[in-house]
Amino acid sequence: MIRFFVVALLAFAAVATAQKKSGYEFSSRETQAMQDDDAANPGFLWVQQGETLWNRRDGAAGKSCADCHGEANNSVRGVAARYPVFAPEAGAVIDIEQRINRCRTEHQQAKPLAYESDDLLALTSFVGKQSRAMSIDVAIDARARSTFERGKTLFEQRQGQINLSCSQCHDDNWGKQLAGSPIPQAHPTGYPAYRLEWQTLGSLRRRLRNCLIGMRAEAPPYESADYVALELFLMARAKGLAIDTPSVRR
Amino acid sequence: MARPLINVPAKAKKGEVVDIKILISHPMESGQRRDNSGQPIARDIINLLVCTYNDTEVFRAELFPAIAANPFLSFCTVATETGTLKFTWTDDHGTVDTATAPIEVT
Amino acid sequence: MTRLYRRRDVLATAAGGALLPLVPAQATPDTMAAAIKEVVGTAPLKPGKVKLDLPPLAENGNAVSVSVTVDNPMTEANHVRSIHLFAESNPLPNVVHVTLGPRAGRAFFATRMRLSTSQKVIAIAKLSDGTCWTDSAQIVVTLAACIEDL
């Protein structure tokens, strides 16, 4: 498999990223159809659950998300298009999962939700869904710059036993077939996403971990700030593409 | 995620054939996999889904492990009268769950 | 709720290491024939009426969209009683058995199925007059079902 991967890549001519394409465009017609019908898209099981949680009181403060934020359609519309973001209260760039958990610990006085737990995926996809069809536009100001640079380094450095970078696949060889599937451009428009391979909804962190493990590289634990850095870099790189979470991907 | 996602048109004309869609959150563990210590993972699927329309059965599906996780089913029914579509599903442990959706027929 | 818990358990296992598929047992043509016989009995299988809608290629075998439509009235006197789906090379040939009747209005259903490998899928419809009709389709599966997370 490793040998196949390297040989296959060597055979490719470099392709310039002339044209930005969402992962949706690399999906089969059937996978696109599954995503496009809200009544058939399994990701909506989590969106529906997220709506229930949004309205449920939790924690010592006895407050629901809705008690503070009201209609999600109004209050958190656009969030998924501009996160990760530098949060002064946290003194760091944070992603939506971290924002939700900050609201739980700081504002609801509730326990943070575990990464990849159904509840965190549900709230993240419910918040994310409010930004569907909005253009991605993250801000890289002075306070986010070092995180962005870290993400860029991680994306461009060769790593793992097969000694390739993310960029070599997703910038230079997108559209080529790898093990029977086209290589996408790695734009995180649709996360959390329902992956057919996972048979469940999963976060962008989980997706990044899959790629790192596929590269036979060390995948840092879920809590690692490196994922936020990669997320920020990827979102900046995806500027202008439309949010389509909950997406369906192979 | 206790609730299924059911799609039934809220309103229909008498005699109209309407589309019904249902998604249920369930791993549909096939019983054909092993965990990383080599132990078989026990089969755990929803094996039956029945839909009644004002208590008359209109659709029944016997499911096998080849049905994908978070099972999706879509079928048709004739809008006969205002009332309730009731979905009942049973898993391998004999647990029975139900959910309903109203339909107004004019 | 217990269901949810078990689901998390499975996830935790997946995160801890690769889930190994069992040696992919395959239904033999014999088990397939037996499964079909159980449904149709001695009635001859006729081609026609049934339309099995299946993509020629699936990018992942974990959830392949499939639908079956039968071109037949749905009246008390003449209707489709049941529709059955079989996958020849899956570990078990049965996929789903659907029971319907005149109240359906249209003999149709859609679902998503697992296919362990490229193979032939067969749909059979049983009519109220006892006749059995069939259609089949060949599908190429790029990535088989049951390959877990790396």
Image (cartoon, grey):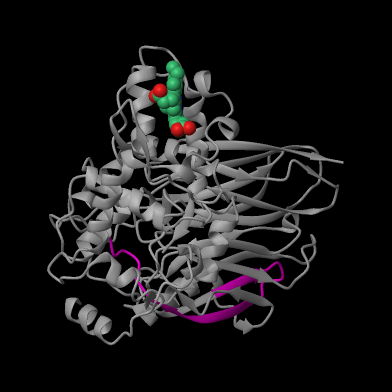
Q: Nearer the viewer, residue A65 or B86?
A: A65
Q: Is residue C2 visible?
A: no
x and y, in percent, of residue C20 in the image: 21, 62
Q: Is residue A217 visible?
A: yes
Identify which residue, A250 or B95, lies in the foreground: A250
- Seen at 17% across and 81% down, the residue is A3
Is A217 within the magenta?
no
In the rendered view, tell whether residue B62 sits above or below residue A226: below
Q: Position of residue C122 (x, y in %)?
A: 52, 76
Task: Give the answer, above or below, for where A180 lies relative to C78.
Answer: below
Asked if residue C98 lies left or right of residue A119, the reply is right
Which residue: 62% across, 71% down?
Answer: C125
Magenta stretch in the rendered image = C123-150
Can you give x and y, in whole percent of width and height, for residue A215 in the image?
A: 20, 66
Decide which of A156, B12 is in the foreground and name it. A156
Q: Is residue A185 shown left or right of residue B102?
A: left
Q: Give the number of marks.
A: 0
Quadrant for the C terminus of chain C in the image: bottom left
Q: Is residue C46 left or right of residue A78?
A: right
Residue A108, by quadrant, is top left
The magenta stretch spans residue C131: yes
Q: Residue furthest bottom?
A: A11
- Residue A207 to residue A67: above or below: below
Q: How far across and how far down the image is residue A135, in percent?
A: 54, 51
Tell which residue pokes out farthest to the front in this image.
Answer: A142
Q: Report the quarter where the N terminus of chain C lies.
A: top left
Residue C122 in the image: above or below residue B8 = below
C99 or C62: which is nearer to us?
C62
Q: Residue at x 41, y 64 (%)?
A: A250
Most extreme residue toward the top is: A61
